[in-house]
């Protein structure tokens, strides 16, 4: 599966939002990832977190942050969750609002022979 996560921090609303998108159309399975367009992705889930909870989790370490990010609705696999957590730590290191997009392809997890 090919997924992308849009992670955005809003200082005014004091929140972090993660939107998970995935390529759901099986006809696109053979399309190279770099050729995919934004409209090839469908929104799967959107989760909003209070910034104070995220900041506290960041201060407690990566495992605490990953645990906070995983909810009933959004539960990325470990390699993706760690990358998302790393990105959020960087985002919270900034003094302004910010958005980041992460792309994952499960085929990248299969070892080359």
Image: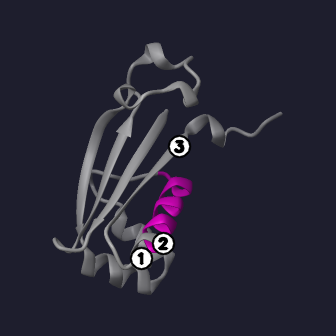
Camera-side residue of 6 and 66: 6
Left or right for 102, reference 38: right
Left or right for 104, reference 94: right
Q: Which residue is mark 3?
A: 104
Task: Please report contact status of discs 3 and 1: CB closer than 8 Å, yes or no.
Answer: no
Crowdedness of circle 1 by 10 Å Cα count: few (<14), some, many (20+)?
few
Task: Please report contact status of discs 1 and 2: CB closer than 8 Å, yes or no.
Answer: yes
Left or right for 25, reference 44: right
Crowdedness of circle 3 by 10 Å Cα count: few (<14), some, many (20+)?
some
> Residue at horizontal 37%, vertical 51%?
6
Picture coordinates of residue 66 (x, y %)? 43, 67
Viewer-nearest of discs 3 and 1:
1
The residue sitting at the right extreme is 113
Viewer-nearest of discs 3 and 2:
2
Q: Earlier in the sequence, mark 3 or mark 1?
A: 1
User: Is 71 located above or below residue 52 in the figure?
Assistant: above
> Residue at horizontal 43%, vertical 43%?
4
> Residue at horizontal 42%, vertical 86%?
59
Quadrant in the picture for the C terminus: top right
Secondary structure found at label 2: helix
| Label disc, if present, on residue 90 of the rendered structure | 2
- Mark 1 to mark 2: distance in Å? 7 Å
Q: Which residues are magenta?
A: 77-89
Secondary structure found at label 1: loop
User: Is 21 located above or below residue 81 in the figure?
Assistant: above
| Label disc, if present, on residue 36 of the rendered structure | none
Secondary structure found at label 3: strand
Magenta span main SS: helix
Camera-side residue of 38 and 25: 38
Q: Which residue is mark 1?
A: 94
> Residue at horizontal 59%, vertical 24%?
32
């Amino acid at each position: 599966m090919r997924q992308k996560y849009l992670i955005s921090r809003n200082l005014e609303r004091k929140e972090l939002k993660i939107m998970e998108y995935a390529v759901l159309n099986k006809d696109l399975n053979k399309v190279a990832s770099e050729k995919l367009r934004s409209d090839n992705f469908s929104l799967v889930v959107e989760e909003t977190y209070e910034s104070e909870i995220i900041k506290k989790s960041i201060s407690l370490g990566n495992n605490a942050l990953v645990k906070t990010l995983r909810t009933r609705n959004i539960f990325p696999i470990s390699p993706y969750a760690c990358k998302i957590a790393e990105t959020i730590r960087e985002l919270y290191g900034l003094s302004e609002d910010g958005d980041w997009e992460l792309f994952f392809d499960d085929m990248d997890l299969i070892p080359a022979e």
